[in-house]
Amino acid sequence: MEDKDRYAIGQQDFKTLRKDDAFYVDKTAFVEKIVRSKTKYYFLARPRRFGKSLFLSTLRYFFEGERELFKGLYIDSTDWDWQQYPVLHLDLNTDKFSEQGILDDVLETVFVDWEKKYGVTEIMDTYSQRFKTIIKNAHEKTGQQVVILVDEYDKPLVGNLNNDENFEHYRKKLASIYSNFKSSAEHIKLVFLTGVSRFSKLSVFSDLNNINDISFDDEFADVCGITEVELLSIFKEGINRLSREYNVSYDKVCARLKKNYDGYRFSPAGSDIYNPWSVLNCLQKGRIGNYWNATGTATIVAETLRDADIDIEQTLNADWDLDDLAGLDLLNADPTALLYQAGYLTIADYDMEENAVRLKIPNEEVRKGLFKDLLSAYLKPKKGTVKTIMDGIVKGITSGNPEIMMRSLDAYFAGIPYDLKVENENNFHNIFYVLATLIGLDANAEVHTSNGRIDLLIETPKFIYIIELKYDSSPEQALHQIEEKGYARKFAVDSRQLFKIGVNFSSESRRIDSWKIES
């Protein structure tokens, strides 16, 4: 089998991967950590497409005793007795749960199979009662305690955060089902849940005060995803193929993969993690592209940020108390928390004294995808005009001709649909920051000086642009503030040419109505 045929894109079943001789990053050392532990209840949060489902599938076949599948992997070299256990694997990642009856359909299909398998003859009235009976019968019939694996335990809730009626319906139903983890403890060997967030109103976290949330644990930091060591050892031929495809050196391909797909960090002392979905797609297709963004919800996240009326740059470079970040509940989520849980932010640094983490955008793929969707959330210019306008902005800035830049920006704002609001100064600032960052400029919003904050600072090798933005005011007032606050003083000995630009946005005309440039 050729190397390029061994990338099983989207395959989350461990048994199928092993039988098809597909690439598999050996995570079975983490299986041993779990089975050797005295802990009965586990929870793991990771972004979408990061391998949570595959890890649960690995646990499933391990506990079902299918040792042949594990030949050559770490766990096969241990002294585990490969005892078979009854495994109840509930996958809630199969639907969007847009209607209230969908969960019933999923549960009915799965429960009927379990009831037949474990000899349940008396079918109870509710799914909670049926689940309790299944757990008890599975234990009694096999003589072994039950392993329960729930993939995306919170999927019905996450899909209905903006639908109160559906959310409450699913919350109650899931809470009643998950309550069996405590009431049936004598029949249970292990419960392992995956998801994106802790929901405080679900019994699984309030009742199980001994649940082990390993989402931020250093020893489980790379339980999902691909480390650099794993990338370079397992996928060397794929990297070589990319090197030949692009006619560049092996080291340059590695650097490009790192820039585009690395940078995730899930614990204070954890190593950097590559996005597995993007890496596998890239190596299989032989092309460096934006793969993860195409599978997700960047549009929803971007629109949430727009509607929250926040400072985008500050939100994307936030500091958080680690305990607060670990205990976040999507029901009361800060926009920064949403970005972290959705995979658009990750841990950059950890301060042990303060028990605080600095967050960042993990890599270039995520940055491009997020900022493109942010731009669409704030502005929707006519199709076909984006590249022309962007080229004009870049040309004006890099050539030292801010008039060209401003005309291009004016054309961009002119494309705002009437029903899309730029209703305050904060959103106006965010649009400038998103635009400048998206086209690859060294842009900083709300830059602190000794006497105030510059709205937007753009620097190139030859030019410096200090931009002050006003909303329903005047460019003269903006320039007056630049002078009054002395924003240009810090660049007094800089040899680059400096431009001061005052810009005013009119809420009535819904566009930039005037600007003034001083050099």
Image (cartoon, helix red, strand yellow):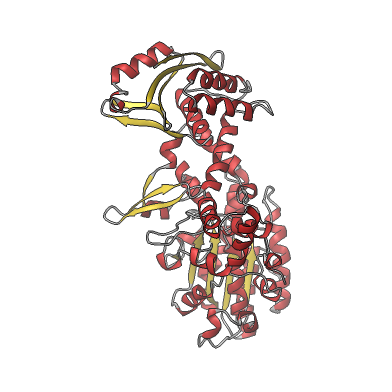
Q: What quarter of the picture does the N terminus occupy?
A: bottom right
Q: Is residue 222 depicted above or below 459 in this figure?
A: below
Q: Classify residue 199 as left or right of residue 174.
A: left
Q: Residue at x 48, y 34 (%)?
A: 441
Q: Classify residue 417 as left or right of residue 449.
A: right
Residue 348 placement (x, y as % from top left): 40, 51
Q: Residue at x 46, y 45 (%)?
A: 332
Q: Quadrant of residue 89?
A: bottom right
Q: Classify residue 37 as left or right of residue 304.
A: left
Is residue 162 visible in the rendered structure shown here?
A: no
Q: Nearer the viewer, residue 396 or 247?
A: 247
Residue 516 placement (x, y as % from top left): 44, 13
Q: Is residue 429 depicted above or below 235 in this figure?
A: above
Residue 167 placement (x, y as % from top left): 59, 48
Q: Quadrant of residue 473?
A: top left
Q: Nearer the viewer, residue 494 or 136?
A: 494
Q: Nearer the viewer, residue 433 or 516?
A: 516
Q: Residue at x 31, y 17 (%)?
A: 483
Q: Is residue 321 depicted above or below 466 in this figure?
A: below
Residue 191 placement (x, y as % from top left): 53, 70
Q: What quarter of the picture does the C terminus occupy?
A: top left
Q: Nearer the viewer, residue 121 or 517?
A: 517
Q: Is residue 478 depicted above or below 399 in this figure?
A: above
Q: Residue at x 48, y 50 (%)?
A: 362
Is residue 72 visible in the rendered structure shown here?
A: yes
Figure label count = 0
